[in-house]
Image (cartoon, grey):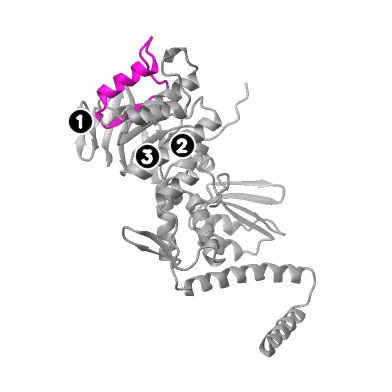
Amino acid sequence: MIEFKNVTKKFDRYTAIENVNLTIQTGSIYGLIGSNGAGKTTIIKLLASIYRQDQGEVTIDGQPVFENVHLKEKLVFIPDHPYVFPQYTTRQMARFYRNCYPSWDEERFKNLAQAFEVDVNKKIQSFSKGWQRQIAFIMALAAKPDILILDEPMDGLDPVVRKKVKNLLIQDVAEREMTILVSSHNLREIEDICDHIGILHKGTLLIEKELDDLKSNVHKVQVAYKNGLPDRLLDKLKPLHAEKRGSVHLLIVRGEEAAIAKQIIETHPVIFDLLPLTLEEIFIYEMGDIGYAIKNVVV
Amino acid sequence: MFELDMRSRKPIYEQLVDKMKELIMNELLKTDEQLPSVRQLATELSINPNTIQKAYRELETQGFIYSVKGKGSFVNPNQKAIDKEKIVEMKKELEKLILEALYLGIPAQELISLIQDLDASKGGA
């Protein structure tokens, strides 16, 4: 289990994250999403023990992470720009990883290199961005870590490789109870793979929830009435967002599906539709609720 | 075994529960038949194993399946829960149809007598 307790990290006078409490269960796939500059990468780098927190605790199974070699041996971090030593080939890089990770599986490395059709004797830096990322995944998966940290993991990968990578990650979660922390702006990707979601904004964790709970708690409602929307409905539902398209009203409402449906049906609408939100919509409306709304910029 | 709609707004675990129920109700999964393991299904569908675990737990509380420790999940022979579910679903569909019929201008009385006729003929058969 990974735990952040009241963690604060400052860079000079700039506070990157403040009082963050976060829990990730073993074997879970945790998605970290947030606005630009919200502190996602700071959290990731704290867990990877690249940064040291100013206040609070970052622990894995109760032990502090910073400079803890035993924990770091079981943790692989793929940054948004995977780093490789200059002039190194995949084979040489693999040798370096083998020395760092006791759980390294040479057999698996060979199989993965074959599955991804990588020429292990070619210099990594001569590969394209997407290929370099594939090689980073091969290294990470061959090291068989307990915890895998991914920063914008699917960036630059084509759809076929994405599917391959996703399937391999899931196999490791299913078979070895590997824990994954993934940050991304591609909410579709996060939605498919994660079971828990943390939403960050301006250095604080706004929401931390199971994805299905998050989704079942917000709904998109489309209603139309013969004589216009009854005023008392809005008072009762307190929508996060309301707009009118022609004669159809679109409301984003928080709460239980059955309760909302009951309240609306009582007002006898002509059209009534209740839909779950996509993660992208949840993100946009939750952010809008705290004043980070979409404004059409005109220059 | 089946496909899930990753683009649907419906949560994946709900889709899974519905699909499994459908398979059980249509007896494509028979009584006491073993369900695919969480691992197997996760790899096959590229879905988070925790989501599948959750779907199985939900199916178990609803009485569709039972689990044996160390062996896996199996289809529950107790059909009561299944019948209940079927009735609820059918009622929903009927509601929709009846409403449509009423909007089309079929008098309610005519619908009632239609039901009574059908009920009578069922009794005779």
Between B113 and A101, the one nearer to me in the picture: A101
**Identity of the amino acid at label 3?**
Asp
Secondary structure under the numbered disc 1 in the rendered image: helix
Quarter of the image where the C terminus of chain A is located = top right
Secondary structure under the numbered disc 3 in the rendered image: helix
**Identity of the amino acid at label 1?**
His
Quarter of the image where the N terminus of chain A is located = top left
Q: Residue at x 42, y 12 (%)?
A: A123
What residue is pinned by disc 3? A172
What residue is pinned by disc 2? A166
What residue is pinned by disc 1? A70
Q: Chain of mark 3?
A: A
Q: Which residues are magenta?
A: A73-102
Let me know if marks 3 and 1 both belong to one chain.
yes
Measured as percent of width and height from the top left, residue A243 is found at 62, 46
Between A233 and A176, the one nearer to me in the picture: A176
Residue A274 in view of the camera: yes
Let me know if marks 1 and 2 both belong to one chain.
yes
- Tell me, yes or no, whether the highlighted magenta stretch contains residue A227: no
Q: Chain of mark 2?
A: A
